[in-house]
Image: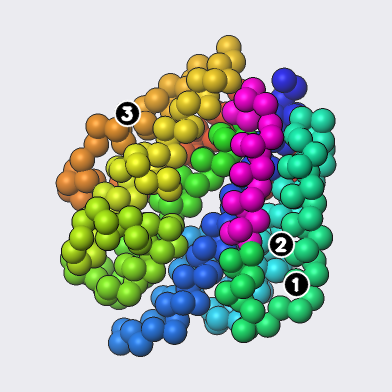
Amino acid sequence: MLSRTADNLFWMARHIERAENIARVLDVAHSTSLLPLDIEGTDAYLWYAPLNITGCADGYEVKHGLARADTVTHYMALDSGNPTSIYNCLWYARENARAVRGAITSEMWEVINETWLELNRLSQQMDSDKLQDFFDWVKNRSHLFRGVTLGTIRKDVALSFIRLGTFLERADNTARILDVKYHILLPSVNDVGGAADYYQWGSLLKSVSAFEAYRKIYRDAISPQRVSELLILREDMPRSLHACMNEVEAALIAINGLSGQEARRLAGEQHAALHFGRIEDAFTLGLHEYLTDFLQNTALLSREIRDSYLSRRDTLKI
């Protein structure tokens, strides 16, 4: 496969996953804002959190200044000037898909193209009472694309690059959500690792579709350590770091390019650390430090994948 084709498939998948993750973060932020939380500075913590999770706080502050619900929502959802907005993510996904029409199925193209056309229609009539429907729509379109992909594409190297992009993006997002909860959302650094507000922890679990699973597995009050264990180490959770790295390592093994040995080594190291790790060790190190290290290793892995397999001249990547 040409590196340019692999590049487009990889980033097509990453941007669709990224759009879904942004919708999840905004959905939970709006839901949490309706709760009667008696925490000083809740609004500031709440609306800066989505910006920090996605790494676009600096760009937002230059353009809008203080974080507010309406401006943060528009900036992250529909602002064409924000490279990581849902609007731009879906545009990037469509452009990457258009560049490799011959490598994807007609059903996959139809889903992406229809999503883009429908987004433009929805963006013209968006108001506050339709936000929940919009977030659900973005998530459902992402689910539809993955379902159509698995149901129509050949199980070849193209699918491996799609899965590689999807699960690298998902792992990065899960780690960022958990890190921001500990490092930013809590009202005091002294609360890290201690008891936290039930509604905020419930919102975090809902943002990664893990609330019901938590209740089934642990059956008691939500605690920071068990939430972290669920989202980091449990490989039976679809959005946990462990589950994501299972998929990343499997995709790299399936691709099996001669130039990708270092990428497979890095992925294997991260997978082994999660497979044999203990949540107590992560808390001993410091969860923020643990997640920062994971994000740095994921970024290193992404660069190695780029250098080994992907074209570096495509301007539609990030």
Q: Could you give the CA–CA distance between mark 3 and mark 1, rounded to whole angstroms?
A: 44 Å
Residue 220 coordinates in the image, percent (x, y): 18, 64
- Membership of 150 in magenta stretch: yes
Q: Could you give the CA–CA distance between mark 1 and mark 2, rounded to whole angstroms?
A: 9 Å
Q: Which mark is residue 87?
A: 2
**Going by the image, does 100 lie left or right of 133?**
right
**Going by the image, does 189 lie left or right of 77?**
left
Q: Which quarter shows the N terminus? A: top right
Q: Circle 1 is placed at which residue position?
A: 123
Amino acid type of the residue tagged 3 in the rendering: Ala
Q: Which mark is residue 287?
A: none
Q: Answer yes or no: do the residues labelled 1 and 2 have beta carbons within 8 Å?
A: yes
Q: Residues within 10 Å of mark 1 (few under 14, many from 20)?
A: some
Q: Circle 3 is placed at which residue position?
A: 272
Residue 118 coordinates in the image, percent (x, y): 78, 63
Q: Nearer the viewer, mark 1 or mark 2?
A: 1
Label 2: element kind: helix
Which span is picked out in magenta?
138-160
Label whose residue precedes the other's in the sequence (3 or 1) = 1
Q: Residues within 10 Å of mark 3 (few under 14, many from 20)?
A: some
Residue drawn at (59%, 79%), measured in percent from left and top? 65
Looking at the image, the residue that sits furthest to the top is 258
Residue 296 visible here: no
Q: Nearer the viewer, mark 3 or mark 1?
A: 1
- Membership of 86 in magenta stretch: no
Residue drawn at (36%, 27%), measured in percent from left and top? 269
Residue drawn at (59%, 28%), measured in percent from left and top? 160
